Amino acid sequence: MSDNPSFVLLGIENTKYEQRPVPKAGPGEVIVAIKKTGICGSDAHYLTHGRIGDFVVTGPMVLGHESSGVIHEVGSKVTSVKPGDRVAVEPGATCGSCDACKSGKYNLCPDVVFAATPPYDGTLARYYQVPAHLVYKLPESMSLEDGALIEPLSVGVHSVAKLGQFQASQSVVVFGCGPVGLLCMATAKAIGASRVIGVDIIPERLEFAKKYAATDVYMPAKMREGESRIEYSKRNAQEMMQQLGITDRGPDAIDLVIEASGAEVSIQTGIYVTRTGGTFIQVGMGTPQVVVDIGTIAAKEMTVKGSFRYGPGAYKLGIAFVRDRKIDLKPLVSHRFGFEQAAEAFEVNRKGKGPDGKSVIKVMISGPDVAAEPL
């Protein structure tokens, strides 16, 4: 193909299709013909708000970063893949020479070129250019939709397996049953969790979580009139622990808490629920300023970590989990759209329900000239 149609964000609530130049692979690069792209919350947020924190859309930007495709072209020094290979795309190229990269934390590289993060273009196009070491061949048993979902799965793998150091027979609570929260649960289950508890305020999400990966689910009670957030969170934690038989120590305690919603009360509740000596990982991006009970954190000698994207080994482990049938990604794709329906796909994602009335979990957009059915 000699053209490169792309779905471009021009400003808040303003998108259009543009023809972009067809990229050419450098010596260590590949060109991927994009076939499947999932809509991430960050894509939707740029569309509706034009920014996420310090990342501000100041010019036209191609959306999309959860993608898979087929190798179209390889550079002169590339030997790891060849044209025709089906691959998952890791969408963040780092410098390789800063302290973060050299210490094995390349996700913290200050000079990362991350797809669909201003000012860099994303993957909702016919072709995407990326270093060859950031594409991962898909086993025959995996579909291209599976490949696109390796990106959000890697967030779960990074937070649970690497940062959380989660082990078989341990227990986990995940706050937020959206795609990332569900994939954190699935990762814990794949590792061999004894108990996986999903927490959300939407009954449909809890119902799906219970069918998908959770052994137990919990829906918090509503806040009382005049109750502060921290008072509510302490009460919520007590009620949750009583209802589900959770203790602070011993075999019924919670080893790991993953906060994947970004909600202040979830963060607070999660700290109270974590066992003495346990680990709390913050994955969700929500209100930047929150009140936390620092005394509880200190008294429990908790480990509290932030989690940002994913690092070395996350893609490979995620693919292995899917290949070995320890994680099934197929149930997560709730809605599918062709490339020419990208604007409609984002609108369905925003509303949270499709025209069929079905709740959104993950919206998948096919690449140009690709049917919307699974591949």
Image (cartoon, helix red, strand yellow):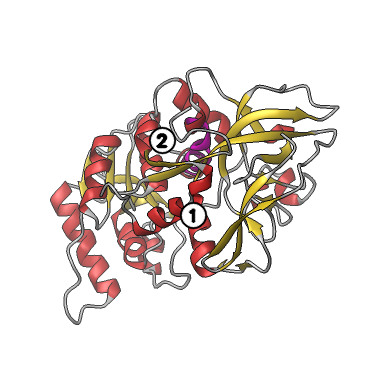
Q: Is residue 168 above or below residue 126?
A: above
Which mark, residue 133? none
Residue 326 position within the rendered picture, expressed as x and y whole percent measured from the top left: 39, 25
Q: What stretch is highlighted in magenta?
A: 146-157
Disc 1 residue type (three-letter): Ala
Residue 188 visible to the viewer: yes
Residue 154 in magenta stretch: yes
Q: Which residue is drawn at 42% across and 71% down?
A: 290
| Residue 101 placement, left or right of 49 | right
Q: Residue at image x 52%, y 28%?
A: 319
**Image x and y of residue 330, in percent:** 38, 31
Residue at numbered disc 1:
343
Amino acid type, residue under disc 2 in the picture: Thr
* Mark 1: secondary structure: helix
Task: Tell me, yes or no, whether the two marked residues, 2 and 1, touch with CB atoms within 8 Å.
Answer: no
Give the alpha-carbon distance from disc 2 to disc 1, as whole Å: 31 Å
What main secondary structure does the magenta stretch of the protein show?
helix
Residue 313 appears in the picture as rendered: no
Give the mark toward the camera: 2 or 1: 1
Q: Left or right? Give the position of 258 relative to 55.
A: left
Left/right of residue 133 with respect to residue 245 in the rendered view: right
Residue highlighted by disc 2: 187
The front one of 301 and 260 is 260
